[in-house]
Structures are given as structure tokens and as C-alpha cells.
Image (cartoon, rainbow, N blue to C red):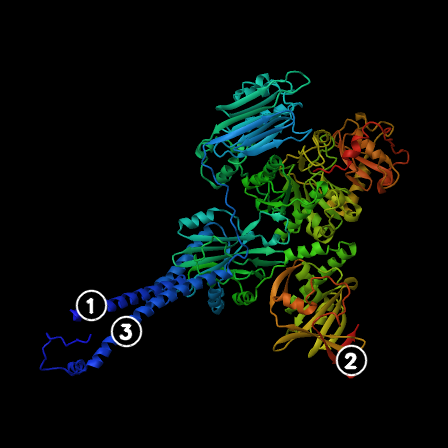
Amino acid sequence: MQKINKNVVLALLSLTSLVFLLFQLYYYKFYLSHKNGAGFTKVRGIQSGQDSTRWHVVRKFLGLISSHNVPVYLIDPLILGLVDKDIEQIRSSPYGPSPECKYFCVPRDFTTFALLYKTWKREVGLFRTAEKMGFQWLKIINKDPRLDGMDDLSGVEVPLHYIFKLASHAIHLVVFYERSGNYLWHGPLRLKQHMDRTFVPFRKLHFGRYPGAYGKPELLLVSIDDLEVQIPKNPSSFLEEMSHSRFLECRYREARAFFQLYPDDASLDAVEFRKKAKSLLHLAALTLNNLGVKFWLSSGTCLGWYRQCNVIPHSKDVDLGVFIRDYTADIIPAFQKAGLPLKHKFGKVEDSLELSFQGEDDVKLDIFFFYEEDDHIWNGGTQAKSGKKFKYLFPKFTLCWTEFIELKVHVPCETLQYVETNYGPDWEVPVKTWDWKTSPSNVQYNGVWPVDEWDDVIQIY
Amino acid sequence: MDEWKPNPTIKPHKKRSWYLAWKYKLMNQRALRKLCQTGAVLFLLVTVIVNIKLILDTRRAAYEEEEESAQDYDDEMLNVEVPRHPVSNKKVLDVEVYSSRSKVYVAVDGTTVLEDEAREQGRGIHVIVLNQATGHVMAKRVFDTYSPHEDEAMVLFLNMVARGRILIFTIKDEGSFHLKDTAKNVLKSLGSQVAPFLSWRDMWTFVGKKGGEVYGEKHAKSPALSTWGDPVLLKTEVHLTSVEDAECHWPDTELNRRRKRFCSKVEGYGSVCSCKDPTPIEFNPDPLKDNKVFDVPVAVIAGNRPNYLYRMLRSLLSAQGVNPQMITVFIDGYYEEPMDVVELFGLSGIQHTPISIKNARVSQHYKASLTATFNLFPDAKFAVVLEEDLDISVDFFSFLSQSIHLLEEDESLYCISAWNDQGYEHTAEDPSLLYRVETMPGLGWVLRKSLYKDELEPKWPTPEKLWDWDMWMRMPEQRKGRECIIPDISRSYHFGIVGLNMNGYFHEAYFKKHKFNTVPNVQLKNVESLRKDAYETEIHRLLGEAEVLDHSKNPCEDSFVPDTEGRVYVMFIRMEQEADFTTWTQLAKCLHIWDLDVRGNHKGLWRLFRKRNHFLVVGVPASPYSSKKPSSVTPIFMEPPAKEEGAVAVPAVAAAEQT
């Protein structure tokens, strides 16, 4: 009897173990498929079926939107990357039939398209047709960014993202808005409380972690994998743009609070200065952009943006930062050509370079060049009469886009850190008397220029 | 386990394989055997445990992953969904209606939907319309039937209300003095038994369904001329119908869905909600050839006058060349009904938190609307600014399309306006004619973005300054000598009677007789001659051909201008310096045109029509055109009348902008 018992026990244990093993396998598969959304990509046997599913979903989607005259274009980084490799061939024969499915079949969870809101006649019919075709769709709406600076307007929410899901593939449609400053903006993707977090694996989306700013793309109608689709004319530059497209909205709410505490200067002088500063900044941006020199708002101009979303009326100049690696000798002639003569030049390319240009009526444009070290970034200052050198140290930062007085410009992404380093913890309190040699909290004395170099490093016009 | 023995049924085999031999050997070694058995059991147990743990782990990992993945994309703001008002399935509504000399109120299911105890206002018959299926208030009106013509408005309104709606009536103070038989008969047809006998200072309440049953009526007769009837309180129950019964059965289209949403919420818009043959809400006017204003944003400035807005949007959307996508309606305040109207037409509307009071509120609303417009359409160089109490001419966009390039190219221009301040029925004639004027008329106009962004927006009057935005825009500091282009015959019509600076009398006197163009596709004449220098040449040519009128006659008399047609006449008035408008104001007064301030002048010259002749008025010697005056002619001087009559009314409305 006991012998049998033992056998039974053994058999039972083996069985349980087997069951658990199967269970585990099932779980593993379930978990994996969950993680991948579309899933199954690891299983080779059915890959071709999956591939054509993606292609079919894209084809269906393109059919849907063309039947409703919704002009979309492809911005999927994965596919654009592949397209870019063959761009010459695709351009030369835009409508040739393709022998194999090279692009739309590659394994992925999403295909991303862009939609220009302006060109879309908002009709609800699109979604009903989509449902009839078997698509499930999700809409992400939020406040209209174009009216974000105006707190007293309401009732305006606009769609930022759409996701159309069919079978195991999903289409991510990013809505782009035209904004003041001649650029396109897309919003962040934020799920509201009641939304289905498992609709698609949101983490894998290429767009939506942050808002983004882009130039207006030139489009090209091409046929790839036998599907006609619009793509950016130059996919590689689009992908390059995408890699640093992160956009920061001005802190309008805080700016309003600031103005409640310190009412804005509405005097005629202030209005006039702001007008001049604005046109100077626009001119500077145009000039530097034409040269391809990347710049950002620095010092007082950056503080004005961060603190009050406007030019500080008593600041009396416009300050820009440029990495010294982006310096070119063309900068000075280009500004001169734009009607901004050089006022002074301090330092040299190797050390503490700083350029000042004379704008209209005493408004000055300062360009500070920034030098990158291993653990910090710095720029220099020079006192003309004594030849004294100063150094302003900043923690490392990256650049983000923002909108400032109707212009798309860069600011340090880590703006608070940048401003705080420069202006100290009390940066929120307006200061009218400011000494660039002593007031900044990150200033360091940096010696004196050798007298024989003065002619070169201190040039005043 | 101790007594584990080899299975006796297995007989030792002769040809034992090495394996069996080995096994046998093992079996013989008890300790080792035991160890193996325990090992196997342990191994199985461990497998089970590990499996369970693995399952738990994967599950937790999956959960965390999910959590994490959502984290980046979570909306930071805590979105607490406001619970929707529970839809009561109740089939019966308790209605309370109170009528008295100084107070009226209506409560539906305990909720007060009307309460008016303010002194000196709200006199007359208050009418409330409820949805018969939901009990929601769809319209609230008061008709001061103590005053004339208000009963006609009430009849008009009651006729517009759809059958089946629940109507609640109550009188405050007095409601019978000018309640004519027609109106009484309408009330009678609704089921009221008292209405035909309503008399002076009676109190009255009535609840009934249009075209159906009566839920209750109470009446208190006034005992004497000098006293009011006793207050009456009517408490009654209303039986709700099903939603299907309360709705029309229009074909299921996108448009009708909008219509349905609108019609189940509000009342008083007439045939748009008629079940049979409703009036269209999409107009599809002819597109314009070469439309230069198709991409120009249109800002409609609105307050809480939804019926006006409805009329305005209808005319706007019927104008040829309209682009509904470019229209944004800006509503000053969180009013629902104007928003309903905007949604009915499928347009976009934005509500604006009111800032400040009176004129400053209007001016802050303008500023917000203009800023928002240029934010929403960053590419736009212009914006068309309209108000909710304007009819828009069928050729409004055609007019702008033909003239907008001037605003782009001619720096000396301030605006293009659709309104001619002096364009009355008897003083405007030529739809193809344009003028340059030094005053800014507003009432449908085009604003250049650069003007707004660079000049106006930065110094727009702040909320504490109680200024009219348009008066401010007309100030020399802002206008800087620039001019506006206007048509001879206005492309907009100001129908608003209720407004900030507006009343019935004022409207009748200054706006009702305004000429309004109804001819489509008018080809404008000589648009290029409106440029700064060309216009001077044009004026000199015109003055050169003009016949000088007989200055011995009274210019107010009709006979001052000969009975001709299509001629050009000129008269000279005295105007000592640039700001001397004494004679002009008197002339304007007797010609029954705008005389409250100076409008429509260009360098001391006014252009209008009299008896279908072009009629020019030149101020001498201030105007540079004075040189055209023959030396024999003495400029006419007209003195203002001694200040008594009219002097009271005029200053009060002098600041009247056309809100």
C-alpha cells in the first residue's frame, strides 16, 4: 500500500509540476505579447503573416483618410530611416511598383503619421467610417496651446493625438498645429484618469513623451511598398530635427503670478523698448539661422522668458548664447549686412569671446560664446578699461525649443538651473540695478588679459 | 519509506542490461536509494515552488511595467470627473409659480428657475419654456406688455415655440395695459381661461402645454385702479413625456444631429427646429472667384444676445466666399445659449472670462479676442472683426477681396470698414463706390496684424480705464493720420436695439434707415484710385467737374439740390480750422445723417448723395480743397440752435459707439 502511495505522490507531483510548467509557458507568452502589444514578433513561423498585417493596416488607414480628404504624411522614424537609405531611388521613380514589402512590413508596433490641423476639415464622419472598417480609436485632447498664454479664455480643447488600432497594429496620428513664430507644434501625450492605459503600449510611441517643435516640412508624394504616401522631402533632416525637437511651453501661469506681484511696466518707454527688442531679436534670429548657427536665449533675455514670458523692459539689451564650436567668422559680416554694426568684440575664439552689435536706438545685441568643459559650461566677460577677465560658470545643459515673442528659439532645457546659477535663488525678484561683474552669482574673477593682447581682445567701435 | 523493496513482480532477467544491473545495484544500496527518492521529491517540490514564484514575479513585473509605462503619459492634473447631473427618471415635475406686484418666481422640482424681485424692472409677462421630456428650461423671456408692441413680440415668440413644450406664464406688476386681443387670443388658444379677461394690475399665473393640456391657472383680480391684485401662488404637477416624443424625426445626418442637440436645449429660434421642413443650417453660398480673403480669420465678438448671434451668423454664413473654418466666435462670459448657437452652425466658439465693467469690459473682450485670433491663425496678415448684432451683406467678402490689397500696400491706411456712417437710404447710392475717410467706423472691419501687434496690443487700454475701444482707436495717438476705406453703401447692417450704448429710440434715429447692400458680386470701381496720392487726383478731378450749388438757398431744403440725376454738385461751408465742425454738425442734423460726432470726412471734405446726385461738402478755409471755391461764393455758415431742446439727450449718447 505504502509503495503505491509513494508512486501516487510521485506521479501527482510530476503532474503538478508539468501543469505549472505549462502554466508558466502560457504566462510567459501572455506577458510577452502584452509587452510587445502586437506581440508574436519573436515567433519566426508567423512573422510573414504579421508583416503583411502591418502593411494591410497601413493600407486601410491610408484608404480611410484619403476617402475623407485628410492630408497626412508619414513621420515614422523607423520607416523614414529605411526610406532614407533608398531615397535617391524612391525620388527618381516615385511611382514604380515594388517587388517586395521593404518598409511597411518591418516589425514594429506603430506606424506614425502627422496631420496638419489647419488643413483638416474637422468632420466626425471619419471616425464612424474608421469604426466600420474595424478600427478602434482613441483621441487625446488637451488645452489649445495657442491660447495657453491667455488664462481668461476657455472652452477650447483641441485634439493632440489619435491612435487607430486594428488587429495587432496601431496607427499613431500626431496632430501638428501652426503657431506664432512660423513653426509646427505637437503636444505631449497624457492620458486622462479614465483612459485605457493598455490600449496600446504607450511607452513605445515615438512622439508624445514631450511636446515638440518642427519647421514646416516640404512634402513629397511617393509610392513605397505599393502604397502612395506623403513623406518629408528630406527624411534624414526630418529625423535629425526630430532628435532634438523637445519643446518647452512658457510658464504662463507663473508669469501671471509674477505680474500680480510686480505689475508690468506699461509706460510708453517700456512699450517702445519691447518693440525694439522684439525686432532686434527677430533680426538676430534670422541672421543666425541663415548662417546655421545654433543659439539660445541667455542672461536677461532668458530670465525674461522664464519669469514673465516677455522682454524685461528695463534690461536694455538682448542676450544670446552660442557654443564656441558653432562660431564662424561669417557672423560679424552677416550682422553688419543685416544693419547691425559691431559695437565691441572681447576675447578671442580660444578664450572668453563675446560680441556686441548695435541695434536701433541704443538697444544692444550681446552674443556670448560658451565653452564646454567636462563637467561644466562657461562663458567669459571682459572689462574694457581694466582688461579684467571674468568667468561665468554653468552646469551642463541641453537645448530645447520654445516660443518667445512670436519666435521659435532655443532655451536651455534645464532653465531653472540655468537661471538660478546666473541670478541666484532670488531670481524671481526684479532687480533694476545690475552689475555684470559682481551681481551674477556664478561670476568668477579670471585674471587680466596680457597687455600686449589688448588690441586684439578688447575691440571697441 | 524504510520498507521500500524492489518490485517483486519484476523477475530478474537473464540478459540484464548494464543499466538494470546498475539500477539493481543502487536499489540494493538502501541509503543511496533513499537519498534518490528524497531528492526526486524535493526536486519536484522546488520546481512547484519556483514555478509559483515565477508566476507571481512575472505578474508583478507586468503590472509594474504597465504602471510605469503609463506614468510618463499620465495627465499631471488630477482629473476629477464632475458627476453629471443625475438624469432623473421621474415622470412628474412639481412646478411652483408666483405672481405679485413686486416679485415673481418659478420653481421646478424645488429649483428656482426664475426669480425677479428687482425694483423698477422686469415688469410684464414672464414666460418660461420647459422641455416636456427633461424639464430643462429652454427659454426665458419677459414681455413688458404694459408698453406698446411688446405683446406682438410675445405672440411672435409663442408662435415659434414648438408644439408640446411646457409654457409657464406669470405677471409681475402690470401686464395687461397693452395686451391686445390678438395676444389674448393666443393665450386663450393655449388653454388659458383667464387671459381674455386680464385687466389692469391683475395677478396671473398659468402652466400649460403648447397644443395640449392645461396644468393649472390662478388669477387675482385687482380690486381697484390704484391697487394690485393679491399675490397668487400656483402649485401644480406636470407629466413628462418620453424623449422620443419630444424630438423631431429628422433624417440622421451630421447636420441634423447638431440641430437635434440645439433644439432639445433652447427655444425661440423658429423654423430651425420645425419638425416638418426645418430651415437649413448649412448655406453653401457660391464661392468667390479669386477670393483674396478666404484665408483671413473672422472674429465675431459676442455677448449674451444669442438671438442676435443666430441672425448674424446666418447672414455671415450666407455671404458669398465665406470660409466657416476661419470663423471664431468670442463670447464675453460663460453663457450657454450663445455657445449652443455657435455649435448649431458647426463653428468654433471661445468663452472669455469677463474682465472689468461696462465699456472697459467690452474693450478687454476685444483685446482678448483679437490676440486669440492672431494666435490661432499665426499666418494671417489680417483679421475681419464683426459683432453679433450685424447683418452681413451677401457681397461682404467680395468687397473685401477686391480691396484688401490696398491695406497691405498702402501704409497710410488704418482699416477697411464695411460701414459708412453717413450711408443712409437718402444719402447713399452707388454700391461700387469707395471713399477714404479719417474716421474709423468699425461695424465690420479689417484689421492689419502688424497694426495690432506692433502698435495697438502693447498699449491697449488697461481694464481700469473705462474707455471705449473704438473711441480709443479713433484717438490721434493711435490713428496717426491714417485713414479707412469705406463703401458708399454699407456692407453691414446694425440691427441691435439692445446694447451697452443702445436703445430703441437711438436705433430708430441713427441706424434703422441705414442703407445696406443686397446686390451680389458688385464690381468695385476704381479701387486703385483709393491709394493715397491717386485719391487726391481723383478728388481734384471730381471737384473740377462739380457744379457749384446756389449758396443763397437753404442747404437743408430739398430744393437746394436740383432735380437731376447722376450729376456732381459741390457746396462750401464755413470751417475756420481743422476742428471746427459747427456748420457741418448743423448740416448733418438737418440732412438726418450722423451728427453726434464728426464722421466720414477726408481733409475737410464730405462725400454723399442727394437726390441721386453726388454731393460734395467742402469746409472753407480749413480744407485744402478750398482753392476750388469760386471767389464769388460765400461759404454757408449755420449756427447751432440756442441750447435747450435736445441738448440733454445728445451728450448722453454722444459717446455712443455702435455696440
Element under label 1?
helix
Q: Residue furthest right?
A: B632
Up-down relation of residue B319 to residue A325 (above or below): above
Up-down relation of residue B154 to residue A427 (above or below): above
Instruction: Kindly identify which residue carries mark 2.
Output: A454
Q: Quick check: marks 3 and 1 in contact, CB under 8 Å?
A: no
Which sits earlier in the primary sequence, circle 2 or circle 1?
A: 1
Label 3 crowd (10 A; few <14 / some 14-19 / many >=20): few
Expressed as whole percent of the image width and height from the top left, the position of residue B315 reads: 60, 37
Q: Is residue A207 visible?
A: yes
Q: Quadrant of the N terminus of chain B?
A: bottom left
Instruction: Kindly identify which residue carries mark 1.
Output: A8
Cα gap from disc 2 to disc 1, whole angstroms: 98 Å
Answer yes or no: are tags 3 and 1 on the same subunit: no
Answer with the quarter of the image where residue A198 lies: bottom left
Q: Quick check: marks 2 and 1 in contact, CB under 8 Å?
A: no
Instruction: Kindly identify which residue carries mark 3.
Output: B42
Q: Quadrant of the C terminus of chain B?
A: top right
